[in-house]
Image (spheres, grey):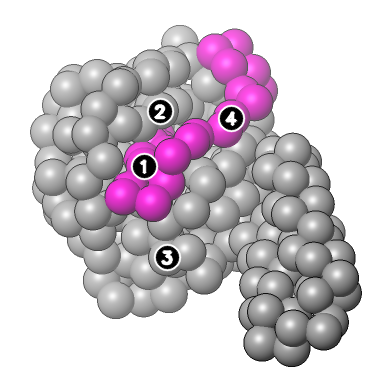
Amino acid sequence: MITRYGIGNFIILIIIGLLSLTGAYFLINFWFLSILFALIGLYIIFIAFWFFRDPERKIPEEALNDRRTILSPADGTIVEIADDFESNYFQEKTKRISIFLSPMDVHVNRIPATGVIEYFKFVAGRKLIASKSEASTQNQQTLFGLQNHYGKVLFKQIVGILARRLVWDIKVGDNVTIGKRFGMMKFGSRMDIHLPANSEIITQVGNKVVAANTILAKLPKQISKYEN
């Protein structure tokens, strides 16, 4: 399945790949150029299908039944878990979990918890290496603040050196469900999740995680102080 968030890019890459294969056919008498064009065309087509793939995911029953559950919003590797003052949505100390996505990972993003989107911000920033800690605050990013019965969650799409575009289709006021698709980061990038400081962290640095499948944490058991 090809993601709807990248269908335009996918079609462009497929056309370029097919043009390269056509060139290979017409250059058949020049075997070296013909092979080169054929290999380039096949590589571009492979990249199009690989990068814009959007596999189905089975959401754990635990996540569907317990709104304290935080699922990974992205495929990748946990590169940092830290205490971090979050100045935009929480405006207090939080636990931050950072996920690095390589160009080989699926780049479709998923909602990490069920709740209501009540905060959004786009920050035009730098394009530092996404695995570096300073990318969390200095790189171009979108911030989504979500609240449910047990607390707040802030998740960020963050560009890296290769990522040139962030795509999303959720907005303030939307009721969102854990594990549902909400956007894409095109090429290598980073996803940060900020949670209440007393959340139970289940994952650890170095773990590979899968969007809408891997449980990262649990929100505090008590009812949120932010609940209306």
Q: Which kind of residue does numbered mark 2 sit on?
A: Thr
Q: Nearer the viewer, mark 2 or mark 1?
A: 1
Mark 1 or 3 closer to N-term?
A: 3
Q: Quick check: 73 left or right of 85?
A: right
Q: Secondary structure at mark 1?
A: strand
Out of 213 and 123, give the one closest to the viewer.
123
Measured in 3D between alpha carbons, the distance from the residue under mark 2 to the one under mark 1, in whole angstroms, is 9 Å
Q: Amino acid at mark 1?
A: Val
Q: Which mark is residue 142?
A: 2
Q: Which residue is mark 1?
A: 159
Is tag 1's residue or tag 4's residue first in the polypeptide sequence?
A: 1
Please state the horizontal and vertical placement of residue 92, each as a whole percent of the image: 15, 26
Q: Secondary structure at mark 3?
A: loop
As drawn, is 54 to the left or to the right of 104? right
Confirm whether residue 149 shows in the render.
no
The answer to whether the residues at label 2 and label 4 have Cβ atoms under 8 Å apart is yes
Distance between the alpha carbons at the discs numbered 1 and 3: 12 Å
Q: Secondary structure at mark 4?
A: strand
Question: Which residue carries the number 3 mark?
Answer: 102
Q: Residue at x 80, y 58 (%)?
A: 19
Which one is in front, 187 or 133?
187
| Discs 2, 1 touching: Cβ within 8 Å | no
Give the residue at mark 4. Answer: 168
Q: Which residue is located at x 80 percent, y 52 percent?
A: 15
Q: Amino acid at mark 4?
A: Trp
Among numbered discs 3 and 2, the one appearing first in the sequence: 3
Identified at 74% across, 45% down, the residue is 12
Q: Which callout, 2 or 1, points at the residue further toward the start of the chain?
A: 2
- Quadrant in which the N terminus appears: bottom right
State the extent of the magenta-drawn residues as a range.
153-175
